[in-house]
Image: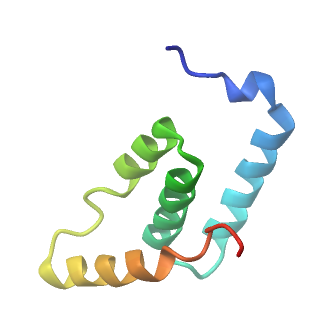
Amino acid sequence: MPRENYRAIAPDAIRKLVELSTLLHKGNLPAGLIHLVYLRASQINGCAYCVDSHTRNHSGSTTSRSGARRRSFRRKSALPWPGPRR
């Protein structure tokens, strides 16, 4: 099944997502944490393309054992952020 071309379907929404990404990366949050939030939002939305994309963007950011612990902590702390409201 072919993927949807979201840039053609909703160009204004894509433009706003790019603006949001730019603002996030200019802030104080580590890039790895931002990617984890993107990954979690993609998982919640069920978008396999985005999950794959954000998994590739985040993989290999740190290979040390202490880096793995930091990634684990950040992953756990990022999980609740973009979740559905209850």
Name the image quarter holding residue 75. bottom left
Of 1 and 32, nearer the camera is 1
Up-down relation of residue 48 to residue 71 (above or below):
above
Q: In the shown orientation, is residue 31 left or right of residue 15?
A: left
The coloring applied to the image is: rainbow
Look at 70% across and 29% down and name the residue there: 6
In this view of the protein, can residue 86 be seen by the observer?
A: yes
Give how far across and how far down residue 37 sits, in percent: 53, 66
Residue at 66% x, 68% y: name it.
Answer: 24
Residue farthest toward the front in the current orientation of the protein: 86
Q: Position of residue 38 (x, y in %)?
A: 54, 59
| Residue 30 appears in the rendering | no
Q: Relative to 32, does residue 77 appear above or below in the rendering? A: below
Residue occupying image coordinates x 40% and y 80%: 76
Q: Position of residue 29 (x, y in %)?
A: 56, 79
Q: Is residue 55 shown left or right of residue 26?
A: left
Tell me how many marks there are.
0
Foreground pick, 26 / 9: 9
Residue drawn at (81%, 42%) of the image: 13
Report the front residue among 59 and 51.
51
Q: Position of residue 3 (x, y in %)?
A: 56, 21
Q: Quadrant of the C terminus?
A: bottom right
Residue positioned most to the top: 1
Q: Is residue 85 above or below residue 56?
A: below
| Residue furthest left as drawn | 65
